[in-house]
Amino acid sequence: MTPPATTHRVEVTVDRPANGGEAVGRADGRVLFVRGAIPGERVVAEITDDRHDSYWRGDAVEILDRSPRRIPVACPAAAGGAGCCDLAHIEPGHARDLKQAVLLDVLSRVGHLDETTIAATDLATRGVDRLPGTDTGWRIRTRLAVDGRGRAGQHAFRGSAVIHDVCVQPAPGMVDDLEGRRFTPHAELAVVLDADGVRHITELAPVAEVRHGDARRRAQQNRRRRSRPRAQTVVEGAEYAVHRVGDRTWDIPVTGFWQAHRAAPQTYADTVLDYVRGHLDPTPRVAWDLYGGAGVFAGALLDGLDGGLERVHIVDSDAGALAAATRTFDADGDRVVTHRGEVAARLYDLGEAPDIVVLDPPRTGAGERVIEAITAAQPAVVVHVGCNAARFARDLGLFVRHGYRVAQVRGFDAFPLTHHVEAVACLVRA
């Protein structure tokens, strides 16, 4: 993000939360998104992006009228400039209230769901649910940056610097003793604390980062470069980490995907199972687990439905995740079939119409093409898991326009002290 040529500060009262952790007000005739402000506060904001005619972005640099919900920043790394705990200045309970407000807003404004439907959801009646455990020490999987001297730390917000103050998200024992160790300069570390309490660290080789040009575009280019395959070196533990949900065990590559919050996989699996049990009759025969990764939801459906399923199809583009699924479901024989590839391209190859569809797409959401294919298959129940509030709401609106209705929505505070929120919806044929 390119800062203005000269420092520009404005006084503004912010009145509502935005989908992204900022608070929204108006200044100089424009909408202003302010990072570090709490709705209801009057602040001085330093403008960080004034390129748009209709809105600006800024950082709160002085609090004039303080919210009673403001607390001392609970995360030293965030206080030092890291991009980790962006809501660490807000009481955690109030942060959940703000996340609820954001989800309700996008369901109406982006998803165009009617007020009666929204008002009947658990999200509206009881708010965003707190996952088991505390608001700190919940993270069992993290990525750390390594600076030019080989010291590990948190990525800075808006920049390539490495912050060495301690973040309060990682579980005890994950990163406590890394301060005195040295790693390959400019590498990254994947750190996982597995189900047995064993720590695993894999080092990912450095990438040649883009260091010139527009800051926002530069950050996007560098994220893409870091997401490409890189040489990996196990520096502690093993290449695979053990995770458990229910009675099943998964061996997941340390650099592979697993939910960050220690309680999230079991909570989401239980929620999916509750939705299916509550809205499906008679006993289903076939399920699709889309963007299914290693098959946590597939396992929950196989083990939790009376009478059992004949088949679950897992579709994902990650070969490592599907290999983990194959190992976990080896004893289930042909009851579990994996399909590697982009979901939109593989849906027409599955060969069996589903009674149940569970989808957990990336932050970009599922989109029109995938939802059109799902609804054309006419499953009785669809469970949609979303990590991006706006894309989640957009997808629900698409399902409604294709003949489904929203039966339930829940929100989960799966990333305490941050603006991120996980949502799970149940849809049935209208």
Image (cartoon, grey):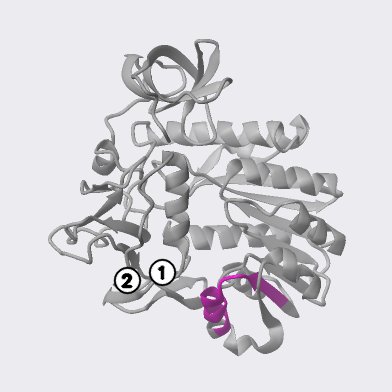
User: Label 1, on which residue?
Assistant: 255
Please state the extent of the stretch shown in magenta in the rendering. Answer: 312-326
Q: Going from the N terminus, do you reach mark 1 or mark 2 first?
A: 2
Q: Which residue is mark 2?
A: 202
Find residue 198 and report its horizontal and vertical position in percent.
30, 73
Does residue 177 appear left or right of residue 132 in this picture? Answer: left
Q: Residue at x 59, y 42 (%)?
A: 389
When the figure is inspected, residue 377 is found, relative to residue 1, above or below; the finding is below
Instruction: Name the amino acid type tagged 2.
Output: Thr
Residue at 76%, 65% in the rendered image = 356
Q: Residue at x 35, y 16 (%)?
A: 66
Say if 402 sits above or below 290 in the image.
above
Q: Is residue 283 left or right of residue 164?
A: right
Would you say residue 322 sits in the magenta stretch?
A: yes
Give the residue drawn at x 84%, y 44%. Answer: 401
User: In x, y percent, where is residue 261?
Assistant: 43, 56
Left or right for 279, reference 386: right
Q: Is residue 352 visible?
A: yes
Mark 2 Cα-neighbour bin, 10 Å: few <14, some 14–19, many ≥20 = many
Residue 236 against residue 80 in the figure, above or below: below
* Label 1 Cα neighbours within 10 Å, binned few <14 / some 14-19 / many ≥20: many
Q: Give the residue type that dot 1 points to.
A: Thr
Please say if the residues under marks 1 and 2 sit with CB atoms less than 8 Å apart.
yes
Separation of residues labelled 1 and 2 (CA atoms): 7 Å
Residue 36 placement (x, y as % from top left): 38, 28
Q: Is residue 16 covered in magenta? A: no
419 or 115, nearer to the observer: 419
Assign a secondary structure to mark 2: strand
